[in-house]
Image (spheres, helix red, strand yellow):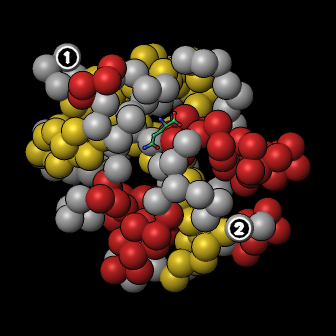
Amino acid sequence: MQIGVLALQGDFDAHRRRLEELGAEVVLVKKPEQLDAIDGLVIPGGESGTFLKLLGEEGFEKLKEFVHAKPTFGTCAGAILLANEVENPKQKGLGAIDIRIRRNAYGRQIDSSIREGKLLQSSLNDQPGSPLEMVFIRAPKIEHVGAAVEVIATEGTDNIPVAVRQGKVMATTFHPELSDDSRVHRVFLDLVTEAR
Ligand code: GLN
């Protein structure tokens, strides 16, 4: 099983390490044609606007084709790229998950923090409400989820969705690669195994 990590910018190396710890073979994806050889892809955090610039029109279209066909997991900026609708400012998305997401939505004081959220019982995880450490860095907020979207983790007293999935595509607004807990990546690898 070959998992690609989009390595244009951002914290791709932490994902590489985590995936390798879990036994996956990891390819750092720097060129669009590398997408042809992988079974799943992680789009890391970073700056989503910069990703768009670095991808260019052709890279964006190739990536769009991939995320509509194969398992993909986006964290933070990666989640922003995967969304249907992006606010603050408006920005184009790959349309792989029916969510509306607002960039840099937590305000200055708490935009970067470590919080404890809940991993929900879901089709991907059978441990109801188990606590999960979540690292947020200039995090976006998922403001709306469409009917086809399953919420797999929430955070805060108002249970804001922070991990979601639609079909073979997953997104988190936090950075699971920066916590010791490897459950979220394991969930993604299970998704890739299932899809093969
Ligand atoms: N603030 C970034 C953006 O809007 C995301 C931050 C992150 O990926 N840690 O793209």
Q: Name the residue at 23% across, 45% down.
A: 134
- Estimate the x, y position of residue 161 in percent, counting from the top left: 33, 28
Quadrant in the picture for the C terminus: bottom right
17 in relation to 89, above or below = below
- Which residue ends up furthest to the front in the rendered image? 108
The number of numbered badges drawn on the structure is: 2
Instruction: Give amino acid for label 1.
Output: Asp
In-image side of 170 versus 64 (left or right): left
- Estimate the x, y position of residue 81 in percent, counting from the top left: 61, 39
Q: How far apart are marks 2 and 1 (CA)?
A: 39 Å
Q: Can residue 46 be seen in this view?
A: yes
185 in relation to 85, above or below = below
Ligand 1 within 8 Å of the CB at mark 2: no
Choose between 179 and 122: the one closer to the eye.
Answer: 179
Q: Is residue 196 visible?
A: no
19 in relation to 90, above or below = below
- Which residue ends up furthest to the right in the rendered image? 58
Q: Mark 1 and mark 2 in contact (Cβ < 8 Å)?
A: no
Q: Give the mark, 2 or 1, whose residue is nearer the N terminus.
A: 2
Choose between 140 and 158: the one closer to the eye.
Answer: 140
70 in relation to 147, above or below = below
Label 1 Cα crowd, 10 Å radius (few <14 / some 14-19 / many 20+): few
Secondary structure under the numbered disc 1 in the rendered image = loop
Q: Name the residue at 67% across, 25% down.
A: 91
State the residue position of label 1. Answer: 158
Of badges 2 and 1, the one in the foreground is 2
Quadrant hosting residue 98: top right
Quadrant hosting residue 120: top left
Label 2 Cα crowd, 10 Å radius (few <14 / some 14-19 / many 20+): some
Q: Name the residue at 64% across, 37% down.
A: 49
State the residue position of label 2. Answer: 30
